[in-house]
Amino acid sequence: MPQIVFLPHEELCPEGAAIEAQTGETLLNIALKNGISIPHACEKSCACTTCHLVIREGFDSLEESDELEDDMLDKAWGLEPESRLGCQAIIADEDLIVEIPKYNLNIVNEDH
């Protein structure tokens, strides 16, 4: 099973986390199941950018993003070449190091 390392984030994951993950799950679902409340205003439907993540290691192991995700990512704060939406990034068989950006474009941050 791949290990997903979430780097420390001041509000959502102050200590960081290392999580064993099943292949085929999304990064967002893994985070939520493990108490990391990454915002997801559109309920995981690829219609916003609140679950924007930056994959610091292992990016190439993820399936390529589709056109809809790319269009949404274009609106994300702090977009980087290794950016993905957590609701769309499906874990493969490699370990990942993931950074949760400090900001997102969500006006109201609600835990779901």
Image (cartoon, helix red, strand yellow):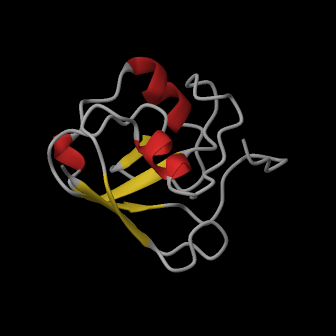
Residue 95, given in percent of the width and then of the height, sits at: 20, 56
Residue 34, given in percent of the width and then of the height, sits at: 50, 55
Q: Is residue 15 above or below residue 43?
A: below
> Residue lying furthest bottom in this view?
15
Q: Is residue 112 above or below residue 70?
A: below
At a point 71% along the width and 36% down the height, the residue shown is 41
At a point 30% along the width and 48% down the height, the residue shown is 21
Q: Is residue 57 above or below residue 22?
A: below
> Residue lying furthest right in this view?
108
Horizontal relation, residue 10 to residue 99: left or right:
right
Count of number-bearing discs: 0
Q: Nearer the viewer, residue 1 or 72?
A: 1
Q: Nearer the viewer, residue 35 or 100?
A: 35
Quadrant, the C terminus: top right
User: To which quarter of the image does residue 7 belong?
Assistant: bottom left
Residue 82, given in percent of the width and then of the height, sits at: 33, 50
Horizontal relation, residue 37 to residue 95: left or right:
right
At a point 18% along the width and 49% down the height, the residue shown is 1
Q: Nearer the viewer, residue 37 or 66?
A: 37
Residue 69, given in percent of the width and then of the height, sits at: 46, 27
At a point 54% along the width and 61% down the height, the residue shown is 101
